[in-house]
Structures are given as structure tokens and as C-alpha cells.
Amino acid sequence: MVRLILQRLALLVPTLLGLSVLLFLWVRALPGGPATALLGERATPEAVERINSLYGFDKPLLEQYLTWIGQLLQGNFGTSTRTQVPVLEEFLDRFPATIELTLLALVFAVGIGIPLGYVAARHQGKALDHTTVVASLLGVTVPVFFLAFLLKFLFAVQLGWFPSAGRQSPSMVATHPTGFYVLDGLLTGEWDAAWDALLHLVLPAIALGSIPLAIIARITRASVIEVQSADYVRTARAKGLRPPRLRRRVVIRNAMLPVATTIGLQVGLLLSGAVLTETVFAFNGIGSFLAAAVFNLDYAVLQGFILFIAVVYALVNLAVDVSYGLIDPRMRVR
Amino acid sequence: MSPEVAATTTGSGGPDPRDGATPLLSIRDLEVTFTTQQGSATAVRGASFDVMPGETVAIVGESGSGKSTTAAAVIGLLAENGRVTGGRILFDGTDLTERGGAGIARMRGRDIGMVPQDPMSNLNPVMRVGAQIVEALEDNGVARGEEARRRTVELLEEAGLPDAQRRAAQYPHEFSGGMRQRALIAMGLSCRPRLLIADEPTSALDVTVQRTILDRLEALTAERGTAVLLITHDLGLAAERAHRIVVMYRGEVVETGPAAHLLRDPQHEYTKRLLAAAPSLASRRIEIAKHGGGARVAADDLLAVTADAPADATRAAADAVVEVEDVTKVFRIRGRGLLGRGTDFTAVDRVSFTIPRGTTTAVVGESGSGKSTVARMILALEEPTSGTIRFDGEPVGGKDRAAEVRFRRRVQPVFQDPYSSLDPLYTIYRTIEEPLRAHGYGSASRRRERVLELMDDVALSPSLLRRYPAELSGGQRQRVAIARALALDPELVVCDEAVSALDVIVQSQILHLLADLQHRKGLSYLFISHDLAVVRQIADRVCVMERGRIVEEGTVDDVFDHPQEAYTRALLDAIPGRSLDLGLRAG
């Protein structure tokens, strides 16, 4: 197990190096540049040149790349051309918000997707099953931003059940020792602040979690159907296992193997979906900041944030592989 | 009937349990129907038989005969689209068909136990083996907690699992097939059921393992007075293990009777065919030449002809198509931990033999004996660590691309499982045409002719050409696999357990087909098998492998009639039904 983790971490180095090259070239291939984006209509050739030389964008590409990598290795991720704040600081400032949102979306997707898929499988071919299949197909096909607008319009604007934007009501006075607003409220005993932050999370989390929910439900359904007809399930019935134990220890445990892999893959989807959702709900996380960076061609932020996200994604998948070994003894590296 | 025969067939040798007792299980006019999208199909009709307390009754038949369906109906585990549509199943006086699903569910484990067919797929892969028996004990209210764990170790020991305490804490994938089957026997008997259904309990195992497992099962059930309903396709095995035999054919019981009696004096035509096809009872090489030259073996020719004259090993030219010389294959096994050193495993150890042209050479042995590795090296799918293999005088492997293509055309494999060796998305036509296409054989119309020719060779109807593998029976699929292998007119066909997955009657048909094709086309076969009874019918020469070495080699008759090695004798003794010398093979 330790060997697996070390191997995978070692593999991460060349992966990130390759990604850094691609990322660097992609960012520079975008039309325009940070100088024109910053200056807007005031962009005279002289002003553009001044900005470019200030940030070193006039140097040869190879030199720019090596400078960037050299700084990275020293823990310096550069400075945002838009906000003039160090990239690392911007990232750490917003990362907790995105984690909170992603986690809640994941809880929503897993907490509803798995039971839904299981129930559909148990009623295979009946009305309930068909409804679930159609609904999950709908869930996969509806674009995230459309669903986000729909939810916001219906539940925030029309019904007023949930707040429509932000992470916490502006009027709420709260201390934030960790940056995770819900957790902060719980730690400091500011219950109203925690509740308020949670309410702000609900709609974005539902919008973000809907596609993973649909996918998880479908995989669970297919997996349970397959496991139900497995020989070992029949044998377990033949030896007289009672239904609760049969469900829990034989069917569900085996059916969860492909679902675990799927959940790991969904984390990537959640991180990319966060860009859209956070923008719609004016949720101050890395997603909305990244979107702003794209419009402003903020090279340092784009490069830094996407690399961070890649690391997070790789680590989550490693965690999934490790947990896979916990569920399935055959996968344990001996 | 001679008293010796009676003694060997009843196994326990005790008094006849049928005397003055009421049946434990009594099946009367049972009818089971499956509902499919095409309508309903009756899988069992009008089946009636009894099982006395403590008695072993075998249901014998080929796949699709309804034998497993009958057993599934008794234990209430029919597939979801199956239903008992008529008749009664009386267990100890109560009618199970009236008890409903929940009623039978309460009896499973405690009153009726089951040992399933395939040990590889019948244990929960994510749970420790011991825990899977503990949960059965707990759910049936036999024992709980520490007591259940102690009892589990005892049960595993009784089932013949060595080092049971440690083994109980392991997972199924750490067990061999034989060990898994012992665990399944322990599981089936854990709650002391009065009736045990054993559905082909050993057909997936090596012969020697098969024998010890069946001995153990017999001892355990005799000691507990458990009645056994044994499901098998092998009449020899049934005769050796059961008191009485029920023969099923196409959903109906065609014959029942005491085992020895039924073997001596079969009444129904189907029982006679089964007897003729049972590999465990056949004893001679199939000689097509002796029966009207190149006569085709039709697909529906169930009555296999088996020659009584010994095989003439010298009939073919003396030159060797394959020479294997001092071949060794070493595999490296990865070590434990971060810095663990790998260890070497010698799968094949200085093996030498030749395959004379136009004959069949068999390599027999148990799993892990290295026989399949030998086959893979001859097919050039694996490279020998040392030693040389020559095909038609040319060394195999390590050649240029063109030479390899030529070699592949002349040497073709037929594998064990006709279900996974055919591409499910290819029609039969495309499957057989593929090698022709790959080797650039003729025009489209010429290829079509060739495919039809091949279909005719293996006695398949041209109407199957547009079908997919899933629509064919196991025997038909294996014929397709053979046709595909023959497409390029190979000289050597390597059959790796080519008939092991088939029912006895189909097995016999395929063996006859292979013998017929050999006679007509002068093919050479390398036949890899764990089943000595099959080898006896098809091979001219045989090499017995044990732990990577050839321990005995010679003509089939020499090896079978005068085995020199203890290991060979053990293999021969393990063939079910061998003790039943009933003089069936008179001609």
C-alpha cells in the first residue's frame, strides 16, 4: 500500500511537468494579452510595451517558462496582473469556499444517487425504474449553468427560500479562523453564521451535484442489477442469509466497487463545474476567480490555479484507488 | 448384479436406506415454466422421483435437460422468470409449492443446503471465507459470535481444509479452486440440513482434487445422515457416488433406478447414448478409419462409435512435426514490500517430446503442472527461457515478421471456453472468414466458398452463418472455433482443454469430429487436458506432467494399461466410474 502511494506520487512529477508546458503554451496562445486586457480602451502601443516589460512578457518564451518554473520550485507562484495580489494568497483565500461547495455537492450526489440507483435496480423494469432512468438521463443532459439559473430563479428569486448569491449574508457578522464558513460557525459557536453559510451553499451544491448524481445513480443501478444475478448472491440465499444481511454485506458491498471509481472521476467534473456554478451564484471560490482570470488573460493566475486543481484531482484519485483496496481485498497490493 | 458392484456403487455400504421409511423429498408431476419475451417455455414437465432420508440420488442429463432447474425449484431459487406451474414438491410431508417464497426462504440453510457448481464465482469476493460461514450460522440461529467462529473453523477442518484457523481469515481469491469448494461444502453443511443439493460440485476441478472432494462430501453426509441430491452430466460419476439415478432428458424424467442396475441394463434410448458418450466409461481411441473411411460425423449423431481395436500409433509417417528439446520456462514472481526481492518459479522444467506428424500427442496434468505453458510456447505466445522448439525443422520464435506470419498460418489454437474465445459482435460467417481475410486469402467470393466448405467440414448448417455466437449452443460454438482454426489449412492444431467445458454427449461429438478431421486432412494435434478419460479417446501418445516435468511418456495404451509412475496411477484412479468394470465397451 505504501509502495502504491509512493509510486503514484512519483508519477505525479512528470505529469505535472508535462501539464506545466501545455498550460504555459495554451495560456499564451489565447488571443490578446494581459496588457491589452488590463488597459482596455486606453491601450496604446507604448503602454502595452511598458506592461509587457514590467512582467517580462517581452522575453523569449523559453526564458519566460524557465523563470516561471524556477519561481514555482521556490514556492513563488507569481502575482496576479489583475489584482496585484500573489497567486498563492488568492488561491488559499478562495480554496476553502470551493472545497465546501464541492463537498456538499458530492454529499448531495452520493447521498441521493446511490439510494436512487439501488431502489431503481430493485424495481428493475417497473415504473419507478423507468422514471429514474429517464430522470437521470435528463440530469446528465441539462447544462450546469442552465440548471443553476433555473434553481436561482425559482427558489431564490421567486420563492425566496434560499439566498441568491454570495457565501454569507452581508449583514452577518462572523469570524473566519479557517475560511470554511460553515466550519467556522460551528467552531466559534456562531450557530446563526454557520446556518446562514449553509443556506448559501444549498442551491449551488444542487446545481453542481446534479450531473454527478445522475451518473452515480446510473452506475449504481447497473452495478446492483449485475451483482443481484451473481452466483455468490444465489449461494448466499441458499445458505439461508436473511434479507437485511444479504443486502448489506453481499449485494451493496460488491455493487459499490465500480461506484467508488465513478465517484473519484466525478471530482474532476465537480471542479470544472464549479467555474460555472460559482459564477452564476457570485460565490467567491476559485471557480469564479478563474473565470475572471480567463477574461483578463491573467497568466499567472491561470497557470497557478489550474496546476493546483490538477494536483488536487490527482490526490483525490489516489485516495479513491487506496479506498478501492479497502473495499476490494483483491485490489490490495501485497 | 455382482455383490462387488453393489458395494462400490452404494458407497457407504450400509443397509438400504429405502427400507420402511417415508421419503424426505418427494417430487410429483413437477412442471416448471420460464416466461421470456418470446413466450413461455416449459423447462421441466411431469417429473417425479423420491429421495429417502440419508440417500444419495443423482439427476443425470445434459445441459438443458432440466436437472438444475429441478434442483433450483426444490430450494426455491429459480431465476426470476421461472415458476412452478404444476405438481408438488413434498419435503418431509409439507408441500413446498404451497409455502410461498418466504416459507422456503426460512428452510434454506437449515433444512435444505446447497453446494454450487463453480467454486470460482460462488464465494463473496469481498468477505473473508470464515465470515461467510459465520453469517450463515448466525442467520440460521445455530450459533453466534465466538461460538460461531469456533464452529466455523471446525467445519472447515471437517471439510478437509488444512490450517483452517488461518485460512478462515483469508479472502476467496487467496484460495485455490479445490480449497474454495471445500469452503462451499462446509458452508452447505454448516447448519446440518437434512437434504443437500450438490449441483455439479466438482466439474470445475482437477480429477484428483475431484475425487478427494467427493470422498469428503460422501463421508460427511454419511456421518450426518444427510440426503444428497447430486446433479451431474457424468453418468460414470453418478454411478460411482449415488444409490439411485434419475435420468432427465428435455425436461422429462426418462428413467430412474438403482445406479448399478441402470448402468447394466439401460432401458431408454437416451440413457444408452449417455452411457456411450460418458468419457469416464469409454476406454478406447476413436478410430474413424475403421468405420467406413471418411464418413462425416453429423451434428445429431449422438451414438458415438468407439473402436475396440488399439490405436495404431505407427500408421503415420515417422517424421516429427514438432520437436520440443530440453525446454525450460521460468517466471519471475514479484516480491513483497518496497524492496522485496522477486523469486523464480519454474513452470516448465527441461521438457522434451516430439509430436509425430498426423497423430495426436496429449499432455496431461493437473492445474499448475505446466501443460498450458508448454502449449503457449509451442504456439509461440511465450518464449522458452532455455531449450529449443522446432516446428517442421525450423526453430520457433525469434524470427522475422514474414516467417512469423507463415508460422501462424500453419499452427492454430482451439481454446477451452467457446463462450469467450469467439467475438460476440462477429457473425459466424465473419468469425470464420477473419483468418482468411487477415492472411489475404482470395477474393470475397472465394472466401465465401471456403467458409461454406469449412462449415460443412465441421457439420454446421449454412443457416447459422448470419447468427451470432450468443445464439449458438456450446457444442456449436466449439465447432465454429474449430472451423476458424482450420480455415488456413494448418498442419498442427493445439487444443487447450478444447472439450473440457462441454457436456459429455457434445464432448463425444467434438472428439469424433476431431478424429474425423485428422483422418481426412492428416492434421497433427497437440491435445492439452486434465481429463485422462478424454485423452484416452483421442490421443496416440501421451505425456504426463507433474510440477513442470514430464514424469511419464508413451503410447496411450502403454500408459493407461501399464502406468509406471505413482502419479500416473493416481490420476488414472481418480477417473470417476473407473471402478465400475461393467463390460460396456464390447463393440
Image (tube, coloured by chain):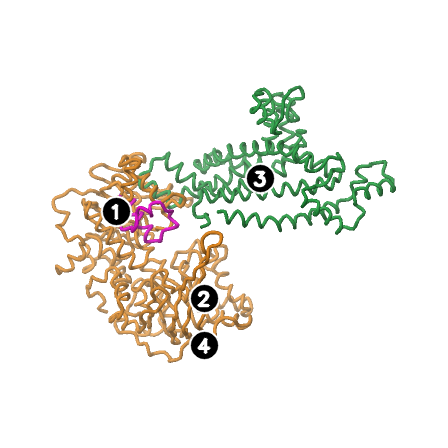
Chain colours: A green, B orange
Which amino acid type corresponds to the residue marked 1 in the rendered image?
A: Ala
Residue A83 visible in rendering: yes
Disc 2 vs disc 4: which is toward the camera? 4
Residue stretch rendered in magenta on the structure: B160-189
- Front tag of 1 and 4: 4
- C-alpha separation, residue under disc 1 versus residue under disc 2: 42 Å
Q: CA distance from mark 3 to mark 1?
A: 57 Å
Considering the numbered disc 4 on the image, is that residue within a helix, a strand or a loop?
Answer: loop
Whether residue A103 sits left or right of residue A328 in the image: it is right
How would you rate the neighbour count of disc 3 (Cα within 10 Å): few for under 14, some for 14-19, many for 20 or more?
many
The picture quadrant where one finds residue A96 is top right
**Residue receiving disc 1:** B47
Q: Which of pointers 3 and 2 indicates the residue nearer the eye?
A: 3
As drawn, B54 above or below B398: above
Between the C-alphas of marks 3 and 2, the distance is 48 Å
Picture coordinates of residue B10, whole percent (x, y): 17, 54
In the rendered view, does B332 fall on the left or right side of A287?
A: left
- Name the N-terminal-most of marks 1 and 2: 1
Residues under numbered marks 1 and 4 in contact, where contact means CB atoms less than 8 Å apart: no
- Residue type pointed to by label 2: Ala
Q: Which residue is mark 3?
A: A267
Say what amino acid the circle numbered 3 marks.
Val
Q: Which mark is residue B392?
A: 4
Q: Pointer 2: what residue? A: B485
Q: Which quadrant would residue B317 be assigned to in this image? A: bottom left
- The rendered magenta stretch, by its main secondary structure, is classed as helix
